Image: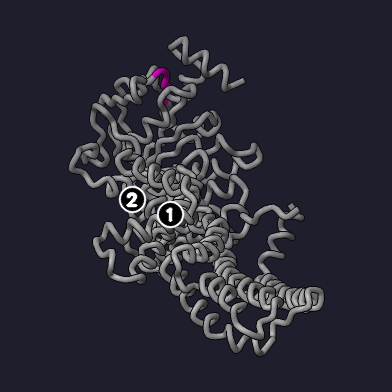
Amino acid sequence: MIRVEDVHKYFGTLHVLRGITLDVSKGEALVIIGPSGSGKSTLLRCINLLVEPDAGRVFIDGVHVNRHDINREWVRQQVGMVFQSFNLFTHLTALENVMLGPIRVKGVSREQAEDKAKQLLARVGLAAKANAYPAELSGGQQQRVAIARALAMDPKAMLFDEPTSALDPEYIREVLDVMTALAREGMTMIVVTHEMGFASNVARRIVFMDGGVILEEGHPQEIFEHPKQERTRAFVSKILR
Amino acid sequence: MATAEASVADVRGHPVVRRASLIRVIEAVIGASIFLVLLQILLNFSLLDPEFWRRYGGSFETGIGTTLRFVGIILPLSAVLGFFLGWLRISRFRTLSWPVAVYVDFFRGIPPIVIVIYASIFGAALLQVRFAGKDLAWNVAALALAFHSAAYQSEIFRAGFQSVPRGQIEAAQALGMRPTQTMYNVVLPQALRLSLPPLGNEFAVVIKDTSLLAAIGTLDLFGVSQDFIQAVFLQPGASVYWLLTMWTAVALVYFAMTTAVTQVLLFLERKFHVRGLEGVSV
């Protein structure tokens, strides 16, 4: 479904991604862990072209997407993205946030978009908050709206960039529950997170990134209990504590 | 949590807000009337002196007409120009943003009255129609005032644009929006909402600054009044208290114009109000 081939990215002289190769099959939930600055976010952004890779190739559903002649807007419609800081449109209600993409980008009618948005908000447990503005919602509620907003575009895959890192502890559960349900329904997803419980439950494979390379990958149990690399071991012991 | 919900419920009651503003207007009118009556008693003049209005009435009407015409040219032009300059100012291409920065610094650094005089002399000369009549010089000077205000307004709009968090723009891109769609659906509604209060300020300044055009002899309200008061004391039967009558009337007209415009902006502010984003009341 998503294939990343020897991708490099520089920010000025900083070599952020140093040859990443990754394959995510349809219906798989992949978790990426790693210390901050290891390039996890940049890798996600290279997949939906919010960041343009400097070298290497990215494929989505078999289509080579980081070509110069590609329609970036089309690529971004194929994969939904959920951000650490939610990034809801603050001047729109929860419902309008979810409706905006389908109406403006896909040209769906208002009625259809509204029906679908209501269904999606119900699915993330927020049917009652449809007319609330983001500033009236808790962090956990905002993030669930953001997930519904991304799903409204019918993406083939979802990218989650530390979706629970900015949340107060009491709101983390509700967001992870929505994501777990999504994974169980067979959504292809790549999740950057340090939630080890979620990773063990949902992912069959965890990738550990450090310094712009993939240092180690494997089943959650292997990575958490018997990491092969010294740096993986050091990192895992820090987040498990 | 309970208190937060209570305050939201209050704000939701839009009729309450509206009625309160109507009461405020009535209060303001009553207050201003009492102030004016006291002022007239204290300073011993009358705003309703028939002999004064017989002589001044014509100038007054001409003056208001001319001032309204200037405001009608300058306000919309400066707002549109200021908006696009503010947009260019945040361009990531320096070839676009740099000239705007220079433009803003230029107009911010020169007194508007000097700009008016310059424009009337050199503007007309540059257009090689030196002898084409006063009207052209006046309009060029009005344009120059519009350019002057546009510099200030571009900074207001720039602040508005930059107040929209980068993350929301990325979220719009991630949904597959084109740059123009992102601008129209995400950036503009929020940028304009935040630009409204300082814009009200600037519009009030623009209206009052049209009086500077009198420096080149325009027949705007300030200009005709200055001419009238100098001429009237050469005529028999003039009262020195007419000075107070006239300038009070002039002040009232400017006050009415600025209030009308700021009320329109206040209305827009209320219309674009977003629940949960109310400012602090202390």
Residue A14's place in the image compared with B157, above or below, is above
Q: Chain of mark 1?
A: B
Q: Does the rendering let one see residue A112?
A: yes
Q: Chain of mark 2?
A: B
Of residues A16 and B23, the one nearer the viewer is B23
- Tell whether A149 sits left or right of B14: left
Please report the residue visible at 32 percent of the width from the left and 46 percent of the height from the top.
A76
Check disc 2 and report its element: helix, strand or loop.
helix
**Would you say the magenta stretch is mainly helix, strand or loop?**
strand
Q: Which mark is on residue B23? A: none
Of residues A230 and A76, the one nearer the viewer is A76
Residue B158, x across and y down, in percent: 45, 48
Q: Which mark is on residue B179? A: 2
Check disc 1 and report its element: helix, strand or loop.
helix
Please report the residue visible at 20 percent of the width from the left and 38 percent of the height from the top.
A67
Residue B75's place in the image compared with A241, above or below, is below
Give yes or no for residue A208 being in the magenta stretch.
Answer: yes
Q: Does the rendering let one see residue A93?
A: no
Of residues A143 and B259, the one nearer the viewer is B259
Q: Tag 1: residue type?
A: Ile
In this picture, which residue range is highlighted in magenta?
A: A207-211
Q: Of the residues under marks 2 and 1, which one precedes in the sequence?
A: 1
Q: Closer to the camera: disc 2 or disc 1?
A: 1
Q: Which mark is on residue B115? A: 1
Residue A184, x across and y down, in percent: 45, 43
